[in-house]
Amino acid sequence: MIDLADVTVRFDDITAIEDVDLRIDDGEFVTVVGPSGCGKTTLLRTIGGLQTPTTGRVRIDGKPPAAAQAGADLGFVFQRHTLFQWKTALENVTFLRRLAGEEPDEADARALLETMGLGGFADARPAALSGGMRQRVAIARALHLGADVLLMDEPFGELDEITRDELGVEIRDVWRRERKTVVFVTHSVPEAVFLADRCLVVCGRPGRIEAAYEIDLPEPRDADVFGSRAFQEQVATVRRTLHEAHDRDRERDRGRDR
Ligand SMILES: Nc1ncnc2c1ncn2[C@@H]1O[C@H](COP(=O)(O)OP(=O)(O)OP(=O)(O)O)[C@@H](O)[C@H]1O
């Protein structure tokens, strides 16, 4: 379980997130959506131990994030530039496990590349892959590490919409089989709804969790879900919350400036 108690992160005079309380169950897929600058990345980095909270406490299965990281319990997927350019797709997938001092399992790495639709590209180097293919390698790498918790920061951020949808379907499918705990940051409301068991709406400066929605959609979630009424209604609800919070924050800021 991921447990954040009263977490505040400050950078000099900027408070990025303030008094965040959050619990994420094992095997839960949580998405974090919100406008630019509201502290989503800071929240994710703090969960992963890449950022130390100014005040408050983070625990992963009762341990500080650094201990979870040392035990390879955490896998990260970032927006871009995370593959080693001189290594093949297969070597990229196995490398982190080597770094973590564990024996890579080439058959597992190949099977993961296959799952991510890259069966024929195991020996290709990143320069020969499209952006979407590179992100698939990064996801396969995080899965191969065997971490129980995956932290994903806009992993589809630079991809076109069709590829994003496609990867969304794949990632949810992999999650259904593997039941990792996933925290997934995105700007995209439809993506946040499609992927989530629970969607957190983060707003404001400093950022706060404005609302949390349990997402109710049929499984397996395939491309048909995008056109369904249930999906569109839940997207509309999240969007409305974001807009209302944004308007309220703007009014408050205007009041302060007067
Ligand atoms: N290392 C840092 N040093 C100083 N300020 C920082 C640092 N990291 C983040 N911030 C500030 O903290 C606030 C939140 O940033 P953060 O990147 O977490 O937001 P975000 O919601 O992820 O934004 P985006 O969606 O644009 O990626 C911003 O005001 C940002 O300028």
Image (cartoon, grey):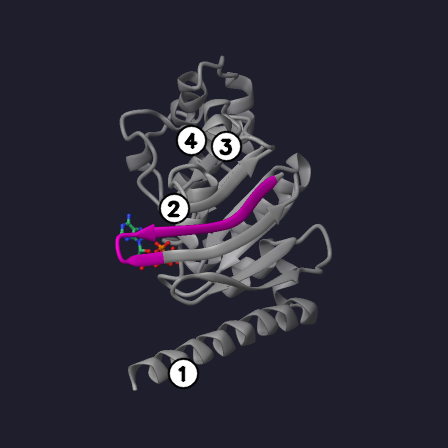
Question: Which quadrant of the figure contains the N terminus?
Answer: top right
Ligand 1 shown in quarter: bottom left
In this view, 58 is above or below 114: below
On whether residue 204 falls in the magenta region, the answer is no
| Residue marked by disc 4 | 121
| Residue marked by disc 3 | 64
The answer to whether the residue labelled 1 contacts the one labelled 3, judged by CB atoms less than 8 Å apart, is no
The answer to whether the residue labelled 2 contacts the one labelled 3, judged by CB atoms less than 8 Å apart, is no
Bin the neighbour count of mark 2 within 10 Å (Cα to Cα): few under 14, some 14-19, many 20 and up. Answer: some
Residue 24 spot, x, y in % from top left? 62, 46
Question: Residue lying furthest front in this view?
Answer: 55
Bin the neighbour count of mark 1 within 10 Å (Cα to Cα): few under 14, some 14-19, many 20 and up. Answer: few
Measured Cα–Cα span from mark 1 to mark 3: 38 Å
Measured Cα–Cα span from mark 1 to mark 4: 52 Å
Residue 221 spot, x, y in % from top left? 66, 53
Element on which disc 2 rests: loop
In this view, 21 is above or below 226: above
| Residue marked by disc 2 | 54
What residue is drawn where x is 43% and y is 61%? 207
Residue 55 left/right relative to 112: left
Which segment is the magenta one?
Answer: 2-15
| Residue marked by disc 1 | 251
Considering the whole magenta stretch, tell me its main secondary structure.
strand
Bin the neighbour count of mark 3 within 10 Å (Cα to Cα): few under 14, some 14-19, many 20 and up. Answer: some
Residue 110 spot, x, y in % from top left? 51, 24
Measured Cα–Cα span from mark 3 to mark 4: 37 Å
Question: Which quadrant of the figure contains the C terminus?
Answer: bottom left
* Among numbered discs 3 and 4, the one appearing first in the sequence: 3
What residue is drawn where x is 56% and y is 52%? 21
Question: Residue lying furthest bottom in this view?
Answer: 258
In this view, 36 is above or below 47: below
